[in-house]
Image (cartoon, rainbow, N blue to C red):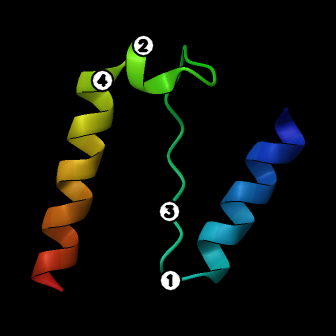
Amino acid sequence: MAAMHEYQRALAERLPNWHYFMVAGTDHSLPFQKPRQIAQVMQVELERYLAG
């Protein structure tokens, strides 16, 4: 699992349209476990994108 996180971080560093966010206490069913946290991250990223 750690290798996959590292791979995703590396992609996010190299690719301008690739983003990686770690949300503690989740697994593959992330949207169902932490929907508010996911929405918050998405909102911040949208605002950053629109301001850029």
- What's under tag 1, amino acid-wise? Pro
Q: Tell me where residue 50 appears, x and y as whole percent.
A: 13, 78
- What's under tag 3, amino acid-wise? His
- Residue at coordinates 26% horizontally, 60% vertically from top-left? 45
- The Cα atoms of the two marked residues, 4 and 2, are separated by 6 Å
| CB contact under 8 Å: marks 2 and 1 | no
Vertical side of 26 occupied by 37: above or below: below
Mark 4 vs 1, N-terminal side: 1
Q: Which residue is labeled 2 in the image?
A: 33
> Local crowd at mark 3 within 10 Å, few (<14), some, or many (≥20)?
some
Q: In the image, which is nearer the foreground, mark 4 or mark 1?
A: 4
Q: Which residue is labeled 3 in the image?
A: 19
Mark 2 vs 1, N-terminal side: 1
- Secondary structure of the residue carrying numbered label 1: loop
Q: Tell me where residue 52 appears, x and y as whole percent.
A: 18, 86
- Secondary structure of the residue carrying numbered label 4: helix
Q: In the image, which is nearer the foreground, mark 2 or mark 3?
A: 2
> Local crowd at mark 4 within 10 Å, few (<14), some, or many (≥20)?
few
Residue 35, labelled with which disc? Answer: 4
| CB contact under 8 Å: marks 2 and 3 | no
Residue 16, labelled with which disc? Answer: 1
